[in-house]
Image (tube, rainbow, N blue to C red):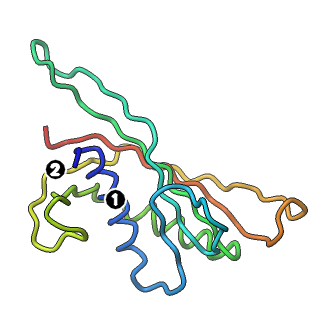
């Protein structure tokens, strides 16, 4: 499995662990393609930017971005889930060797991603355009590999 995919799984694993106490919440890797289940959280990998960081070395520092979509039943639920996600990334993202198992139990940590930016935007939903009213937020997490 490629390292980028392991980083994607690490984000999904972290978000899933933030909501172990919540029943009825669906967490998906990628945007929901089936009918929308409310409440749910969708995690999608975003932009990857490579930047040279050392003269004479072909290695590069990788900046990653993830977009986390929250679909909630009401404003309070949307805000609670969004704030929980924002706070959950305070200590960065531990990336494990998911080739040895998912979720990780005693597998070694491969690297760590330092979260350098977190944003939360509220998405307005027009009630006349949806069959069932829901509330939505987009959280963007940007991180850099600090294991290098």
x and y percentages locating residue 78 in the rendered image? 62, 70
Whether pointer 2 and pointer 1 mark residues with C-beta atoms closer than 8 Å, the reply is no
38 or 94: nearer the eye? 38
Compared with residue 126, is residue 143 higher up or lower down, i.e. above or below?
Answer: above
Q: CA distance from mark 2 to mark 1?
A: 16 Å
Q: Earlier in the sequence, mark 2 or mark 1?
A: 1
Nearest the camera: 77 or 10? 10
Residue 96 coordinates in the image, percent (x, y): 18, 59
Taking the view exactly as shown, the residue that stands out farthest to the top is: 56
Looking at the rendered image, the quarter that the C terminus falls into is: top left
Q: Is residue 120 above or below residue 62?
A: below
Tell me the element at label 2: strand
Write the residue at 15% across / 18% down: 58
Secondary structure of the residue carrying tag 1 is loop
Q: Residues within 10 Å of mark 2 (few under 14, many from 20)?
A: some
Residue 62 picture quarter? top left
Q: Please give the residue where the numbered disc 1 appears in the rendered image.
A: 90
The answer to whether residue 29 is left or right of residue 74 is: left
User: Residue at image x 56%, y 73%?
Assistant: 80
Q: Is residue 88 left or right of residue 34?
A: left
> In the shown orientation, is residue 81 left or right of residue 78?
left
Question: Residue 144: x, y in percent?
Answer: 29, 40
**Within the image, what quadrant is residue 137 found in?**
bottom right
Give the residue number, with chain letter if any, for mark 2: 111
- Tell how many labels: 2
Residue 127, position in %: x, y?
A: 86, 64
- Can you tell which mark lies on residue 118? none
126 displayed left or right of 90: right
Give the residue drawn at x 70%, y 54%.
123
Residue depicted at x 39% and y 73%: 18
Disc 2 versus disc 1: nearer the observer: 2
Local packing at callout 1 (Cα closer than 10 Å; few below 14, some 14-19, many 20+) is few
């Amino acid at each position: 499995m490629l390292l980028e995919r392991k980083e994607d799984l690490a984000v999904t694993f972290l978000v899933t662990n933030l909501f172990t106490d919540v029943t009825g919440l669906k967490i998906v890797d990628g945007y929901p393609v089936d009918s929308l289940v409310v409440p749910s959280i969708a995690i999608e990998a975003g932009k990857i930017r490579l930047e040279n960081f050392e003269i004479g070395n072909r290695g590069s520092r990788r900046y990653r971005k993830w977009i986390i979509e929250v679909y909630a039943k009401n404003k309070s639920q949307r805000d609670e889930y969004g704030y929980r996600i924002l706070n959950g990334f305070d200590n960065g993202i531990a990336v494990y060797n998911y080739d040895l198992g998912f979720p990780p139990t005693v597998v070694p940590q491969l690297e760590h991603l330092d979260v350098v930016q977190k944003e939360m935007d509220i998405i307005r939903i027009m009630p006349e355009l949806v069959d069932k009213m829901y509330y939505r937020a987009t959280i963007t997490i940007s991180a850099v590999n600090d294991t290098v």
